[in-house]
Image: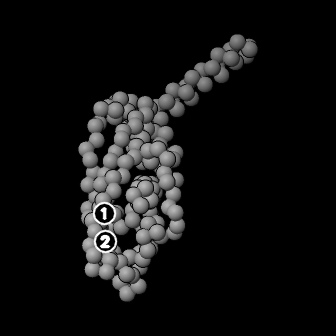
C-alpha cells in the first residue's frame, strides 16, 4: 500500500465519521431541540440581613410555584402558624406576554442560533400583621435565553432560584 493510498483511506474514514457525527447531532437536535434558562437582568441587590421580613405563615401553600419562589428569595422565614406573627396570602403570578420574533431563527435552526427574550411577571401577596393588611407587589424581570448550549447550563440553573433572587433584590430596593 502506498502512502498516497493510505492518506486517501484515512481521509475517507475521517469524512465518513464527520458525516455520521453530523447526522447524529442533527437527529439529536430534532428530538431534543433547544432549551431555555432564565437569567436576571442587571445586577441584583443582596438582602441586608437574613429573613428581613421576619417569620411568616403562608395561608395558601397550594400555590406551590409562588411558595417556592418566596422560599428561595429568603425574604421571609416560613414557619408554622403558631410561630409566626405575620400571615402571607400568596396570589397567582401574572406573566406578561412575550414577543416571539427573536425565537423564530432559533426554532428554524433547531437551536443553533441563540435567542434572548425579556420576560416579566408580577409577584404579589397580601401581608397581615397585627390586624393591618397590606398588598405587596413586585415586578420580576429577567432574560430567557434559548439555544442548544443552554442544555449545558440546565442542570446548574433553576428558574425558581433565579426568580427568588430577583424577588429578594426587588424587596430590598423597595425598603
Q: Nearer the viewer, residue 134 or 65?
A: 134
Count of numbered marks: 2
Tell me the element at label 1: strand
Q: Residues within 10 Å of mark 2 (few under 14, many from 20)?
A: some
Vertical order, 133 against 85 (above or below): above
Q: Is residue 16 above or below residue 7?
A: below
* Residue 26 appears in the picture as rendered: no
Q: CA distance from mark 1 to mark 2?
A: 7 Å
Residue 174: percent from the left, percent from the top? 39, 58
Q: Please report the residue visible at 52 percent of the width from the left and 67 percent of the height from the top.
A: 49
Residue sitting at x 57%, y 23% = 15
Please state if 136 lies on the left or on the right of 19 as rendered.
left
Query: Residue shown at 50%/61% (left/top)?
Result: 47
- Marks 1 & 2, CB-CB < 8 Å contact: yes
Tell me the quadrant of the picture where the C terminus can be found.
Answer: bottom left
- Position of residue 103 measured from the top left corner of the image (x, y, whole percent): 34, 34
Q: Is residue 137 above or below residue 144?
A: below
Label disc, if present, on residue 127 of the rendered structure: 2
Q: Which residue occupies the foreground of this view, 92 or 124?
A: 124
Q: Is residue 79 visible?
A: yes
Q: Is residue 109 left or right of residue 100?
A: right
Colouring chosen for the image of the structure: one colour
Q: Which mark is residue 12?
A: none
Tell me: residue 11, above or below residue 107. above
Displayed quadrant of residue 35: top left
Residue 28 occupies quadrant: top left
- Quarter of the figure with the N terminus: top right
Q: Residue furthest bottom?
A: 82
According to the picture, the residue beneath numbered tag 1 turns out to be 136
Q: Nearer the viewer, residue 131 or 9?
A: 131
Q: Earlier in the sequence, mark 1 or mark 2?
A: 2
Where residue 79 appears, as percent x and y from the top left, is: 41, 79
Amino acid at each position: 500500500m502506498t502512502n498516497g493510498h493510505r492518506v486517501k483511506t484515512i481521509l475517507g474514514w475521517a469524512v465518513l465519521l464527520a458525516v455520521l457525527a453530523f447526522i447524529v447531532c442533527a437527529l439529536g437536535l430534532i428530538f431534543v431541540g433547544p432549551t431555555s434558562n432564565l437569567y436576571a437582568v442587571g445586577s441584583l441587590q443582596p438582602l441586608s440581613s437574613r429573613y428581613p421580613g421576619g417569620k411568616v405563615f403562608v395561608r395558601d401553600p397550594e400555590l406551590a410555584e409562588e411558595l417556592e419562589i418566596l422560599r428561595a428569595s429568603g425574604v421571609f422565614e416560613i414557619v408554622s402558624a403558631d410561630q409566626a406573627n405575620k400571615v402571607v396570602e400568596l396570589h397567582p403570578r401574572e406573566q406578561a406576554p412575550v414577543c416571539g420574533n427573536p425565537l423564530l431563527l432559533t426554532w428554524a435552526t433547531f437551536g443553533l442560533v441563540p435567542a434572548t427574550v425579556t420576560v416579566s411577571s408580577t409577584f404579589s401577596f397580601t401581608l397581615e400583621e397585627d390586624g393591618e393588611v397590606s398588598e405587596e407587589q413586585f415586578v420580576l424581570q429577567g432574560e430567557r435565553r434559548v439555544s442548544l448550549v443552554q442544555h449545558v447550563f440546565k442542570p446548574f440553573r433553576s428558574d425558581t432560584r433565579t426568580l427568588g433572587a430577583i424577588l429578594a433584590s426587588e424587596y430590598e430596593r423597595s425598603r
